Structure formats: structure tokens, C-alpha cells
Image: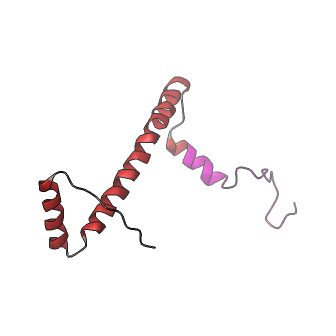
Amino acid sequence: MSRRMTVVFHDDELYTSLKVEAARRHIAASEIVAEAVREWLESREDAELLPLIESARTEWKEKGGRPWSEVEKEISENPHPLSPPLHGARRGGTK
């Protein structure tokens, strides 16, 4: 689906640079603008995550944590952590 929008450039140099880049890449200027807007929106989403990441780091420093290698080993030993352990049961469901 295609939508139209008018963008007014108050900076002639920016407009010219956009048109030159579009011609160099053999694409419409609107594709470059759309790409730039997508990247900007993604960077805003990433910026919103930074406080959460920092909070998790602080909590890890305060309360301690485990090295990833330890977690990896635990996962490989019990790939289904929500399932109860089989304690001596063989495959096939019987002891």
C-alpha cells in the first residue's frame, strides 16, 4: 500500500544531497527518506530499551549473577526446565 506525503525541505543543501544520492543509487528519493525514517524509529526503540538494560545490569551487580557458561551447562543438562525431572526413569516412560 502506498501513501503520499509532502515533505518540505527548508535546507536546499539537504534537498540537493538527497536528490544526488537518489540518482547515484538509481532509486527514488522517497525510498531514501523511508529508509531514514525506519532507521530513526528503530533507534528510538533501542533508546527506550537502554534504561531497562542499565537497570538489569545494576540489579546483577547488586544481587550477583551467574556466568553465561554456567547457565548454558544447566540448559544443556535440562533442556525442558519446566518439566519435572525423570529421576531414574528410562526413555519410554517406565523404570
Q: Is residue 76 magenta?
A: yes
Residue 23 located left or right of residue 65: left
**Residue nearest the observer in this picture, 15 or 36:** 15
Specify start and end residues of the magenta stretch as a single range: 71-95
**Residue nearest the observer in this picture, 44 or 9:** 9
Q: Quadrant of residue 80?
A: bottom right
Q: Main secondary structure of the magenta part?
A: loop
Residue drawn 52% across the image and 30% down it: 60
Residue drawn 16% across the image and 55% down it: 14
x and y, in percent, of residue 29 in the image: 24, 67
Q: Is residue 89 magenta?
A: yes
x and y, in percent, of residue 71 in the image: 57, 44
Residue lying at the far top of the rendered structure? 62
Residue 25 located left or right of residue 51: left
Residue drawn 18% across the image and 62% down it: 18
Color theme of the render: secondary structure
Residue lying at the far bottom of the rendered structure? 26
Residue 12 located left or right of residue 3: left
**Residue nearest the observer in this picture, 75 or 90:** 75
69 lies above or below 79: above
66 lies above or below 8: above
Image quarter in which the C terminus is found: bottom right
Residue drawn 88% across the image and 63% down it: 94
Total residue callouts = 0
60 lies above or below 21: above
x and y, in percent, of residue 32 in the image: 27, 64
Residue lying at the far right of the rendered structure? 94
x and y, in percent, of residue 93 in the image: 85, 64
